[in-house]
Amino acid sequence: MDYENQGITWLDEENHIDEVKFCESYLQEYDLKCINGSFFSIDGFVSDGEIEKNIYNIIKNHVARNVSKKVKQLLEVLRFESYSEELPIQNDRIHVKNGTIFLNGMFSSKKEFCLNRLPIKYNSQSEQPKAWLAFLEELLEKEDIITLQEYMGYCLIPSTKGQKMMLLIGKGGEGKSRVGLVLRSILGNNMNTSSIQKVETNKFARADLEYRLLMVDDDMKMEALPQTNYIKSIVTLEDKIDLERKSKQSVQGTLYVRFLCFGNGNLNSLYDRSYGFFRRQIVLTTKEKDKNRKDNPFLIEKLRTEREGIFLWCLEGLKRLLKNDYEFTISEKASQNLYHAMEDGNNIISFMKADDFVKLEPATMTTSKKLYGCYCHWCDENVEKPISAKSFISYLKQSEKEYNIQYSTNILSETGKKSRGFRGIYIKIRM
């Protein structure tokens, strides 16, 4: 008799592992649920790597060969053994390290299975985060701090009802990326760090965001997005979305992730100049860095010590956002930032304001050919790159109400022939 293996129920008489019995034994010690292929414990999401390490530690003295293969086999059997229906998405509470905060003001130390548990304790008596507030005062205008507070609070619950992503734009060196590090200390593995460009262009990247509360892009690329379909969908998503993982069949998955991007310029698209792309953005710009400011290399360590107080500060922002039915407080500066971002991504807006080139007047008209030629001339004068004629006309057709113009196929050209064009606008330069 092998006395060393006595009491181990998942080894057979030949010391081979009974995979089902092993998984039953494992789940008695580690209470797990497998939902859509992902593992969750009472403390939220559990990575495959963490479970594989546990399995390895348990079986390493009982398997002589192909240990890695056996670990992966047991992991797959464990998915079947711990299969569970989807857990409800709960927007009325926040699961924290020491219990559950209900947004009606109640707190319970009782824990329940959940999709997201934050690795932070709720302490209603936490001190005010003085270093954090001082840091924000140097980083942002007072009105924009309120917006950031609401957005950080928004990221505490699994909801996309706010229908916004946030961009924090600066010249560099202001310390804006510290906001992401503070959020990491509050959200833990409920937050991913990635690239907004990757989310749009890499078909596997979106699956990594399933069951995540926030994705931070701490160095947003300046290059324009080739398309915006996925980003726009995720920001406003209220249903399932197709998710694809390597070597696996795509599935309908649950995404409620929010985006927070830090960069030196606006997020632009090569082809999408629609208001729908920009209306999903909140653009905050940082203050100019004080030339006399001495950077503190230990600032993030100090901020992390205040994380329980910062969490309460975020919670205050969330409650204000909910009271306002998910309408964010947007300052005049932030509104102007968004308008400038739209102009930066779409030079037609600036062209339409150039009253020495075009004029909006009800009883006038011009052909599409002449209007596009005028636009190209304006671009040449202002060192701008003109977009294609098709995209130019398409944008104006979509913006008829904004400019009080009307597309028509019966505009008389200089030769007296009927052409396509617009009523309510004429060009002021000789072509």
Image (tube, rainbow, N blue to C red):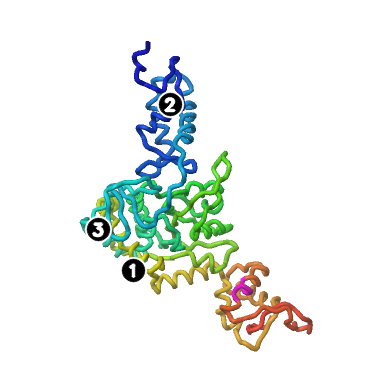
Residue 129 bears which disc, if any? 3
Residue 56 bears which disc, if any? none
The answer to whether residue 397 is magenta is yes
Secondary element at image label 2: helix
Q: Residues within 10 Å of mark 3 (few under 14, many from 20)?
A: many
Q: Position of residue 287 (x, y in %)?
A: 35, 66
Name the N-terminal-most of marks 1 and 2: 2
Magenta-highlighted residues: 395-399
**The furthest residue to the top:** 1
Q: Nearer the viewer, residue 247 or 302?
A: 247
The residue sitting at 65% across, 89% down in the picture is 363
> Taking the image as drawn, is residue 287 in sight?
no
Q: Nearer the viewer, mark 1 or mark 2?
A: 2
Residue 232 is left or right of residue 62, and the answer is right
The answer to whether residue 125 is magenta is no
* Residue type at tag 1: Glu
Name the N-terminal-most of marks 2 and 3: 2
Residue 21 bears which disc, if any? 2
The residue sitting at 54% across, 69% down in the picture is 275
**The furthest residue to the bottom:** 363
Q: What separation in Å lies between label 1 and label 2 (alpha carbons)?
A: 60 Å
